[in-house]
Image (cartoon, rainbow, N blue to C red):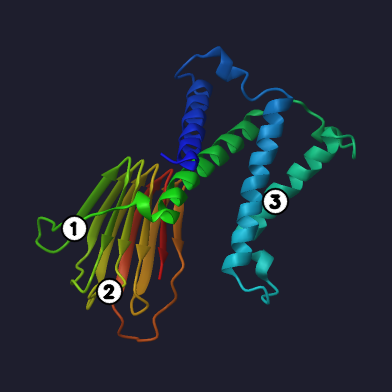
Amino acid sequence: MKPRTVIGIIFIVASLLKLAAMWGIIHWSFLESATQGTAAIYFAIFLLMFVGISLIINDLRDGKIKNKYLFMKAKGVIGILLVVPCLLKLATMWGLIHFSWLERNSMNTLEIYVLLFVMLYVGIWLIVDGFRKSPDQWLQRPLPIGEDGKRISCSVSFGGDEYIYHGEPFHGAHLRTKCGGIRMDLREAIITEDEEIDISTFMGGVELLVPPTVNVVVKSRSFIGGVGNHTIKATDPAAPCLHIIASNIIGGVDIKY
């Protein structure tokens, strides 16, 4: 297991334990004081700055530098809103500026919730991104055939499975992940009509690689997660459509060419 995966698991477990303590599910005294004191504030500041800077960099990378509205994108705006308050808090702690509302040495309940959800986000990102950027993490599987003889059904827990089409017809899929990832490469699949891909993730992720000859329509509902659709509308008006139906709980879906 790679270090980034271990760190991701630690972040997720620590966040869930703290949430359980806040909700009265467990009663561990050390969890009640884990978010108090200067060390906890420094940890929160640098974690939020890491996420904010990552969002800004991704916004720069995904957009075009010549676009004058670049920083009006959602990722860039959220990144700036995370980084600026953190810098102000650091400046206050180091005595460079004096804002009374920033001089507290403890976090209120709302700030703790924000920190925990950010930790969950970072933990999931470290695990999923580790699979995506390390080809040796993916176990290539043969294409399974569903009960209807056409639609495939894939499920993975605590691992990463990869499914690659090499000219086979594609007739939809059910994808399920739990603490793991699925990578499905449809770039060479034969897609002649509209198809549906039903996705459900829990503390995991799905990466879809689709051909540029299809349109992608996404419908999703997520809790601490989401769907990133990096495709564009096909030029052929008669192009088939992939309907992505995604349900994410602390997880996500990435769709690209």
Check contact, mark 2 vs mark 3: CB within 8 A: no
Q: CA distance from mark 1 to mark 2?
A: 15 Å
SS for tag 1?
Answer: loop
Horizontal side of residue 28 vs 87, given as left or right: left
The quarter in which the C terminus is drawn is: bottom left
Can you say whether 105 is above or below 171 in the image?
Answer: above
Which label sits on residue 142? 1
Can you say whether 197 is above or below 136 in the image?
Answer: below
SS for tag 3?
Answer: helix
Q: Nearer the viewer, residue 237 or 124?
A: 124
Query: Which amino acid type is shown beneath numbered disc 1?
Result: Pro
The quarter in which the N terminus is drawn is: top left
Q: Residue at x 55, y 38 (%)?
A: 119
Q: Residue at x 24, y 48 (%)?
A: 155
Q: CA distance from mark 1 to mark 3?
A: 45 Å
Q: Nearer the viewer, residue 216 or 162?
A: 162
